[in-house]
Image (tube, rainbow, N blue to C red):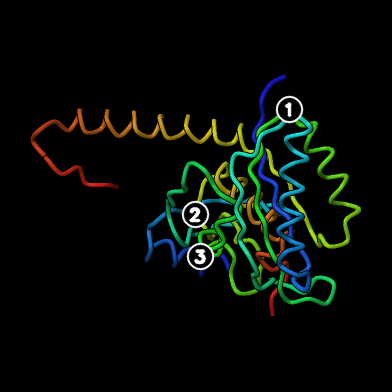
Amino acid sequence: MAEKEMEILDERGGMDVGEDVIGDRPRRYQRRRPRQVVPEYVDWKDIDYLRQFVPERGKIMPRRISGISAKDQRRIAQAIKRARSMAMLPFVAD
Amino acid sequence: MANRTYEVMYMVNPDTPADTIAKLNEAVGKLVEKEGGTVVRMDDVGIRRLAYPIQKKQDGYYVLFEIEGSGQEIAELERRMRVNDMIMRYITVRVDEDRKAATRRREKREARAAKRTKFRGAASEAPAEA
């Protein structure tokens, strides 16, 4: 039933579609923000930039939503973690 | 010894008087120089609101140093910061390699952009960014 919903989304959006293998069959998903351009140097002190990958709850946005490459996602995640340890970003926010 | 660049940031208890913080910053600079490093940049960020309380404090006084050296001075500096109870948090990040990677990435990007405009030629003056 969830799969049907996803298929409808695909037909409507037709943007970037990826697949995640969770369990026995791949789950289809649609990137929310296709093809993001990430700066060459991700500064862990640039909180305003990093905030766009930290939703309200304070968690790091998954790649399937953020729409950035795996390499860039690693760099961004690292920067967010550094900023967190200096209390510039929250670990949890509620 | 290979020269490395580090960013050292520490957070001082905001209740400490300003002249004590100034003295601390000076001491950090002197220590780095004594151990054979150089201070490239010193940025006194000042008091900022913390994202979560540390030692029951809502604010912190941030200071950022950019240091060039062998790594020896960093070891000594971290040892001192650990025992200093004015300093609530500190972080050291080695940046030279990441910066080098960034310039490589930029060159690659620019080369690709140049190729793209050449391919499109003078027919379309404004290259539409995808």
Label 1 chain ID: B
Residue B119 in which image quadrant: top left
Q: Which amino acid does label 2 sit on?
A: Gly
Q: Select label 1 or label 2 by which is in front.
A: 1
Q: Which amino acid does label 1 sit on?
A: Ser
Find out whether the residues at labels 3 and 1 contact each other: C-beta distance under 8 Å.
no
Residue count near mark 3 (Cα–Cα under 10 Å), binned few <14, some 14–19, many ≥20: some
Q: What residue is at 20 percent from the left and 28 percent from the top? A: B118
Against A35, residue B16 (above or below) is below
Q: What residue is at 71 percent from the left and 73 percent from the top? A: B59
Residue A20 x %, y %? 61, 51
Marks 2 and 3, Cα distance to the nearest angstrom? 17 Å
Label 2 chain ID: A
Looking at the image, residue B112 sits to the left or right of residue B53; the answer is left
Marks 3 and 1, Cα distance to the nearest angstrom? 54 Å
Q: What residue is at 19 percent from the left and 42 percent from the top? A: B127
Q: Select label 3 or label 1 by which is in front.
A: 1
Q: Mark 1 points at which residue?
A: B70
Residue count near mark 2 (Cα–Cα under 10 Å), binned few <14, some 14–19, many ≥20: many
**Residue A6: mark in rendering:** 3
| Secondary-structure class at tag 2 | loop
Q: Quadrant of the N terminus of chain B?
A: top right
